[in-house]
Image (tube, coloured by chain):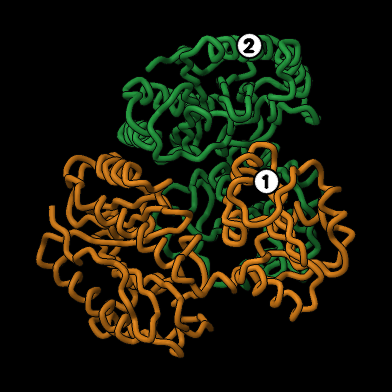
Chain colours: A green, B orange
Amino acid sequence: MLNTKITGILNGMRQKNLDSIIALKPENISYVTDFKPSSFSVLILKDEPILFTSKLDIEDASEVSSVQVEAFISMDDIKKKLSGIVGIESSMTVGTHKKLLNNFKTEITDVIEISRIIKSKEEVENIKAALQIAESSIMEVEFSGTENEVAAQLEYNMRVRGSSKPSFETIVASGKRSSIPHAQVTTKPLESPVVIDWGAVYNNYSSDTTRTIVETEKQEEIFQIVLEAQEQAIKSIKPGVKASYVDKVARDVITEYGYGDSYIHSTGHGLGIEVHEEPSLSTKSEDILKNGMVVTVEPGIYLEGEFGVRTEDVVLIDNGAKVLTKIKKKLSF
Amino acid sequence: MLNTKITGILNGMRQKNLDSIIALKPENISYVTDFKPSSFSVLILKDEPILFTSKLDIEDASEVSSVQVEAFISMDDIKKKLSGIVGIESSMTVGTHKKLLNNFKTEITDVIEISRIIKSKEEVENIKAALQIAESSIMEVEFSGTENEVAAQLEYNMRVRGSSKPSFETIVASGKRSSIPHAQVTTKPLESPVVIDWGAVYNNYSSDTTRTIVETEKQEEIFQIVLEAQEQAIKSIKPGVKASYVDKVARDVITEYGYGDSYIHSTGHGLGIEVHEEPSLSTKSEDILKNGMVVTVEPGIYLEGEFGVRTEDVVLIDNGAKVLTKIKKKLSF
């Protein structure tokens, strides 16, 4: 018996006149089979799906996977299972394509990614559990010492609460470094403000939150503008709305206050098995919001050479916007 | 002035009759420019190399990069810089290839990866520093509680010592789970034996070490066989030797003791900016060892349903084998 997730993907595959789909991206394999491979694995989707995993993974995979598991011996075994037009992920590498599919007709398709955009209740529960771990973890952090000491505490707290790893490289950017949106953690002592952007992974699902601890009057002023941008953007979220419109709402607020040029990234992104997935809340996005999508809303203002402020919450689209992040907006030292 | 690393890569490029090379893999960009991008970045290598980074990275990149940095605005800017035959990484995705290079003649080349195989003194120092962080970190771990509590302590210790992140997903696999080479950390209480496979990242360079804490007589017996396999394999390492021969030496020892079928992975891999890179110490490898390579040597025996043992050290090929791992082979609870 195939589960509804798989039958949906197979339907999408047939609509595109593909004879099979080959998936290598661990996140796509984990979405379809519930097993996240640790080494090279190949999922073939057709009437009887098969997951090929290496010997390193086969014991775990056989226990967990919702589709039949076979040991990966050689590329030839995989080629034997393929025929006709093969749907491939846009993330497949040209090296793998050359080795595996040189003699096949292939078509880039993102049927699995498209299926992943709308989250099931169970998926939303996993994201909420990841958020819960991330939030209770930051509440126990002592904001003193160096950036990397704060990151160490936060990551320790998430680990002992059951997170398998940080959902992305933790950001603790303080003082001038807060003006770099993706600043790497340093061994410098904390200064104000402190931007913390962090997430946990629970059951393969990610959380993603940002808070900025501000101190001076100027920092507080910028903080309030970012907050207003975020509130307006969240209010604008509902099914049927263009994702680019939500970006525009946040950007307009920041521009009105004169900081438009200092808002140097997009307003948000989908969140699930990957920490960045569809849809994109950006100027150029062509996505339309739908019920069941989970997105981040994370405006920021970055004053080069001075400081930066960002606030990020996770939102489930459920008629309106349902904010899944529970932690308060303002943390303090 | 181009540094010798870049001139070497440009020479390799010309020998292959390529007009330019385009690199997107963050590890390749970091190797060439010293800047590790946090978001989509493109390095174009030709007489005047250029690094395109997003606005998110440009402040950091401009400070660190050894090649000229420009803001990435659109794919068209990149296309304008390309002409003739373009060398592409085998890791480029088919999606990016289609978007960016559909109208170009491309050839898969791994000129940068090949340059990365032989480490400079400075690179070896970075690997040694990562190892030092990893080793001093495990010495402070209290081996009690659950698998994830041990992983949390170990990762905390590495963070406060300056590691930017674990070099791969930390393995703490105890009791029966130790028979799974890539076991995910669970929230189960520790049992014997405990396999710990962990690494730090320092200045973008990785370490990779495994130790198994054994308790029973049977575990001790297997531990000694693995140790013998590792010692013999390390002894066999010198420039000019086939990488597959080193694998054979380890495998032969384990097979002699009757556990050949329980050695289900290869003997080692190159280590550097990536935790798995060339050369491969495996049955099918065609690599030849050379001075300046850094490899892991990590035989293991996995008794399904019972337990597993693995021991892993890092070796620099420097006429003979110079073991960079300093920590003792036998840890205890």
Q: Give the farthest residue toward the left.
A: B217
- Number of other residues with Cα within 10 Å of mark 1, as a class: few under 14, some 14 to 19, many 20 or more: some
Residue occupying image coordinates x 48% and y 72%:
B119
Indicate the secondary structure of the residue bearing disc 2. helix
Could you tell me which chain the residue with mark 1 belongs to?
B
Could you tell me which chain the residue with mark 2 belongs to?
A
**Which residue has dot 1 on it?**
B40
- Quarter holding the N terminus of chain A is top right
Residue occupying image coordinates x 31% and y 24%:
A142
Disc 1 to disc 2, C-alpha distance: 28 Å
Q: Is residue B77 left or right of residue A140?
A: right
Q: Amino acid at mark 1?
A: Phe
Which labelled disc corresponds to residue B298? none
Give coordinates of residue B160: x percent, y percent.
32, 42
Q: Is residue B261 left or right of residue A329?
A: left
Give coordinates of residue A316: x percent, y percent.
60, 19
**Which residue has dot 2 on it?**
A225
In the image, are marks 1 and 2 on the same chain? Answer: no
Residue occupying image coordinates x 61% and y 36%:
A276
Of A89 and A141, the residue lying toward us: A141
